[in-house]
Image (cartoon, rainbow, N blue to C red):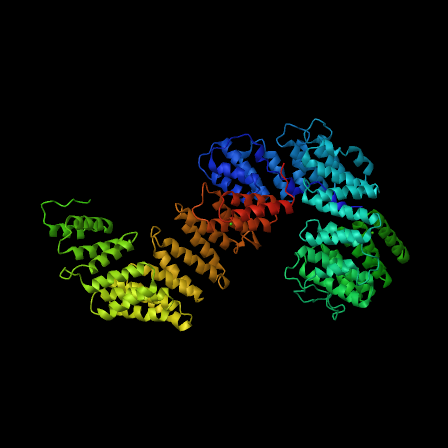
Amino acid sequence: MLGATMFRLSAIPAALLALHTMLAAAETDAPMRKGREALAAGLWEIAAFHFESQLARKKLPVVEKSEIAIRLAEAWIHGGRAAEATSLLRQSFVAKHPELPFWNGQALAAQGRYGDALARFLPLIENESTPHHAEIVFTTANLQLALDQPQDALASLSVIAGNKEHPRAALARLGQVEILLELERFKEAREILPDPASLPPGEQARAMFLDASLLLAEERYQEAGDRFQSLLAQPRGQTQRFHHLTVVGLAAAMKALGETDAAATLLLDFIQNHPDSEQLAELFKTLESLLPETPSLTDPILERLSQWITPAELPATGIAASVEGDAASAVVFDDSDPPPAALLAHALHLRALGLMRSGTPAARNEARRLLTRLRLEFPSNPLVGDAMFLLARDALAANQPDAASYLLETLRETPADPRLKGEAAFVEAVAAFERGDFTAAAALFDTAARNLDARDSRAARLNAAMVRLAENPGATTIQNQNSDPEISADLDLERALAQPDPAKRRTAIEEFLTREPEHPRVPEARLAAAEAALAGATPDLSFARAQLDTIAAMQPGSATPSPARLALVRLRIEDLAGDPPAAIAAAKAIIEGFPADPAAPEAMLVLGRNLFETRSYNDARLILEKLAATDADPGRAQAAWLLAARSAALVATTQSQQEALILFDKAIDAKGPVSPLARLEKARLLIDMNRIPEAAGFLGKWFRSLDAKDPLHLPAGILLGEALYANSGSNPAALEEALAVYDKLLDHAREQPGVINRIQYLRGRTLEQIPDPKDPSGKRERQAFVAYYSVLETEGTPAEWHYFELCGFRALALLEKARRWPAAVACARKIASFKGPRAEEAATRASQLQLKHMIWED
């Protein structure tokens, strides 16, 4: 028969329903609307963020404030902040909200205070006008089951189940069937099981599953197997839990029909394909029942288990490991993609159990090693108690009473499964009796009796009595100005040449050339027009070349411009054309042909830059350092220092990079327009050289001196954050400093959505590394998720895609990590809805998650 733990109504946290979707109030306020949308998608942190911002508003009307508080409490309860929700619900402005009793009870239940929650719900259960009455009924039944009150749970469900007109009556009856199955009251369960065809599509699969489970319990194995097989072949409409338990049921039916090998293969293959199933315990329990009483070492189950057991990461130490410390190594499977921890734990346990049963010394040695590894690597796993029990029994069989006693006593003092505690006490009692310690044996049999099921409890009590009788009777627990026609042509040209704007200057010169084509200063005018064409926002290289070609073709005797100036314009053309070899040759010709001309320094700068762009960093640096040290133009000299520093920084030697830092300092000390840029690049180099504390100190001092409106405030802050983040390995407090920097940048970048995306990504990445003050063992992943997801709440097309989608996919990863599958599907679809570069990837991920985790839509 299927395991009893299978038949349970939804677990308590799952009963906390997102009931905001049922409210009729129309939302016009964007934060409230976004908050409700987030609740509907299961994004509790985002919902809480919006409701918190609304609750912080001043002079809110009481009714509005009360509604916001209720929705915030709902988000907090779902998001694991139930204690805060309880405190909020105690506020006087919430007192008259009709949903208060319901959410009060849910908050208590989410804190594990089942008895207190039950006391809140029981007085409401008979009043159908109570808000969320049906949810109160189902939650009450869940609480009663959690408190081991199945009979009371049946009675609570009957409030709805007995009313055939109630829209959820069939759902309540299905809940009752689950409970009756667990109580082995099969006839009653069969009598109230609704016909699947009469149920809404969303409930039909569940009813069919329960029908199959009843058939199995009624020993109608072939019918049960056929029904389970049908469910397995058509999973649509099933929850993942029931779908996976269908495999358990089918295997149990196959076993009963004598198809043991096929049942084992079914289970092993299913576990292999679903290693992160939340029903691993039931799957492995059924697999255990298929192990032979005395399996061979080549048994298919044991061999498959060995493939799931990766090499141990921890040494086996301690008293339990001292038993047969020279045990043979476990069989391991070299797999680059290791199995999930839960699968590994179950595989360790079941293989050890099978090896224990085989009885050979080598197998028992390996079993001990596997069980000890289970205890060391998974100390909080429920299987650890059973591992300790098996080790204790083995120690007793090996005549090592001290090791057995240590293990059994530890097991009895651990908050383990009561059954295990009872079995441990029973075994220890037998050992005490055999060594003649009757008083200890009787007390241990009493402990066993309090923890064991009815039949075994009676056996323990009987043994206690017999021991006392043997001793003696007695005792017992996230403006142009047109040229004046009267003015001479020379003055006309001068005015054209004086235009400050290159485009207007070019136009004025062209008008002059049209009016005065034979003027002796035409070559000069054409050269000036070429220069203007190159100085514009969009350089016109063809026009500039045409002007130079026309000048070169003019008859001798024309007023020819300076050869150096002509050469410089040709150099500019080649440079702007992106032809480094031609630009380098033209620059060298000017430097060599006109070394004393003012064109030479400019040619040196162009030469150095083109050498830099062709990665001739050493040659570039030599030219640029010489220019910087000799140029009378401070602006050009500073630019040369900066470019020389860049050249040195890109030579991959420590010495060259050290020299680059000195050159950056020269550019900074020149105090020209590129000083801030030199500061940024120096800091970048310090980070790349792994001189992180020095970079953080240098950037921190500069950043604090910058006005928030300074255009370099953002890039300097982002670089400072990077340095602080990188420094967190040796200085954990640097993460909080980095977060403070990003928070400050966020405040100063509100009108720059593209920058906001980047900052939120950096904030989220940092928050993921900072311990949660409320849970030091975890990180601030909830706040990181809010940071990441906030960019997805943009209206319209994102300002940039790179960081926008990085944030989206990181938010998705956190939801997957937390196994919040419906919310993860909603998040992936949200990313895809923007139709960005990775939209297809997001849509595919949504589909994969939906199929894998069986998230069906009506």
105 left or right, relative to 6: left
Q: x, y percentage for residue 755?
A: 42, 50
In the displayed structure, does residue 133 sit left or right of residue 830? right
562 with respect to 322 (left or right): left
Residue found 78% across the figure and 33% down from its top: 192
Residue at the spot 19% in from the left edge and 45% down from the top edge: 480
Indicate left or right for 289 with 534 as reference.
right
The quarter of the picture where residue 720 lies is bottom left
Give residue 355's position: percent from left, percent from top: 79, 62
Give whichever of 178, 602 is nearer the camera. 602
> Residue 536: x and y, percent?
27, 52
Residue 538 percent coordinates (x, y): 30, 52
**Residue farthest to the bottom, as pictured:** 655
| Numbered-mark total | 0
The answer to whether residue 528 of the structure is visible from this angle is: yes
Q: Quadrant of the C terminus?
A: top right
- Tell which of 438 and 584 is nearer to you: 584
For this rendering, which residue is in front, 740 or 577? Answer: 577
Residue that appears at 73% across and 37% down: 207
Is the residue 695 above or below the residue 443 in the image?
below
Residue 409 appearing in the image: no
Q: Quadrant of residue 130?
A: top right
